[in-house]
Amino acid sequence: MATQHSRSAARIMMAPAVFLLLVWMLVPLSMTLWFSVRSYLPLRGGDQGFVGLENFTRFVTSSAFWPAILTTLIIVGGVLLISIVFGILLAMLLDQPMWGQGVVRILVIAPFFVMPTVSALVWKNMFMDPVNGLFAHLWRFFGADPIVWLSDASVFSIIMIVSWQWLPFATLILLTAIQSLDSEQLEAAEMDGANPLARFAFITLPHLSRAITIVILIQTIFLLAVFAEIFVTTGGAFGTRTLTYLIYQRVLESQNVGLGSAGGVYAIILANIVAIFLMRIVGKNLDR
Amino acid sequence: MGRITLDKVQKAFGEVEVIPPLDLTIEDGEFVVFVGPSGCGKSTLLRLIAGLEDVTGGQIRIDGNDATSVPPAKRGLAMVFQSYALYPHMSVRKNIAFPLRMAKMEQAEQDRRVQAAADVLNLSDYIDRRPGQLSGGQRQRVAIGRAIVREPSAFLFDEPLSNLDAALRHGMRLEISELHKRLDTTMIYVTHDQVEAMTMADKIVVLQAGVIEQVGSPLELYKTPRNLFVAGFIGSPKMNFFHGAEAAKHDAHTIGIRPEHLTVSTTEGTWKGTVGVAEHLGSDTFMHIHPEANPSETITVRVGGEFSATHGDTVFLTPADDNIHRFDADGMRMG
């Protein structure tokens, strides 16, 4: 039945979905490209015509651009580091047989289901508040001055909040990978004289390499777009302005759609560079 | 040196006793095969010797030293696993060198030993490949290579041939036997295949439900099985058993006759029967015969060479009286 006829039928049936996806993607993309070459100031005269690449040069020469790129990289890198290191540790812990395993696993995944805005607000008000936060109480209990998290350690605070949300995802993927490890390999290594640390380094970690790459790939794409956590906590102040946040400020706070769109195009290029780079690593890993 | 003594070794998983207290001595240089049906505890016993499982009671001695609580790596034993357990991300060379690397051996010595093992096992051509690029038999040889570089005092094999096809299995069986002759090291081999046990072993240990049913050389087990279980387990095709009147004629509760100890004739004999299925192999003919006295039963008979009989033919069987095994009501051998 896999004939010309059934294949064209399949194409016809897929067409609405493909069309919808294309419209969904292409309309905003072309609008972004369109606005990025125009001077469009909604509250100051509206669309003032074609300006060439002026928006693009203005966006990168602005003093806020490079710090925003750096902040983005620090936040993405920090969250990746924390979620992978702790993800591996947690996954190995959860892999151990224990009482109430099912419930514990669900609890571990729970943070992933909390909306970013909500979790950021909970962290901001419940943990990091310098007067009433739990951390402040803890610090005072030991006689220390509470840290004003969101202004004194702002980037780290954001990293902590976002890591809390993404750790479950990393743990889950790494846990399934660990579960697929052949226990005879570990036993063989044990017979071969490898101590627990060597078994981890030579057997478990290489086995996890593919899962780790997948976690890095997926998380990076989502982490580049982190917004709500910054919006409800620092509002982009204290050095927490990422590229995404900078674009938001250009469009909505400065009311400069053209400049923001140019930033958006840069963000698209950046995300694609990362994606291509990571896809190649994954591809290389999958070959093995 | 590799003399292994099990003294009242016992294993229980929680409430379930898998191996009741068991004594066994394995002499240096011996090829010992643990054989039994699946779930009889033979793999568990091997894992106890390896140290991958802790004993519940009793003592394991290797060369006279108590090894009961010695970690696996320090026992000087090497194991070949059923799944081969090769490290998929390492080349054949690195796989074989892994135990040496863990022992922090000098690089030159490592290379020398790996090369020697690769030569012995014909692995030199694919020493830089990964396990995923090798066939089943080649992987098997890599696993053996990883075991021999350590120069252990004994090798443990856990059903190493069960993942290979029949032709390869036969070849590997010969290779392992030859390896044993050459290295002259103790080998303990676990299998559920009695053919492997018969062809390779110096000493067979027949296990059932964690209990040793009989220990002896292959021919001892074949000629004088201690009980009904061993009689039925050793030998292929299986021994034929007769109860009731036939057994009573020989003053026994049960008698057993191996298929090769029955003579077939188309004209006369002790028992008359009809041929059910006849398997013509050219070298042998196996026939499944339904005796006239009790047609629901099947007697298996082996005839050397070709015997032209087909389904429904009437034949006569005569047992060789010298080769009748007699068992009492408890299933134990008589006389």
Image (cartoon, coloured by chain):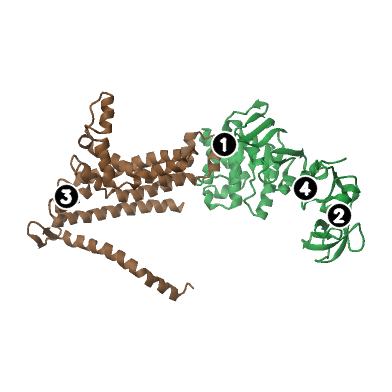
Chain colours: A brown, B green
Front position among marks 1 and 4? 4
Q: Amino acid at mark 3?
A: Gln
Residue occupying the point 38% across, 48% down: A215
Please report, as a chain letter, where disc 3 is located: A
Task: Answer yes or no: are tags 2 and 1 on the same subunit.
Answer: no
* Measured Cα–Cα span from mark 3 to mark 4: 85 Å
Residue on which the image places disc 2: B262
Front position among marks 1 and 3? 3
* Measured Cα–Cα span from mark 1 to mark 4: 36 Å
Q: Amino acid at mark 2?
A: Leu
Element marked by disc 2: strand
| Number of the label disc, if any, that sits on residue A191 | 1
Q: Is B182 positioned to the left or the right of A29 in the image?
A: right
The 10 Å Cα crowd at callout 3, few under 14, some 14 to 19, many 20 or more, is some
* Measured Cα–Cα span from mark 2 to mark 1: 49 Å
Front position among marks 2 and 1? 2
Task: Answer yes or no: are tags 2 and 4 on the same subunit.
Answer: yes
Q: Residue furthest top?
A: A143
Q: Amino acid at mark 4?
A: Gly
- Residue B152 visible here: no
Q: Residue furthest left?
A: A45
Residue on which the image places disc 3: A249
Instruction: Give residue A154's quadrant in the image.
Output: top left
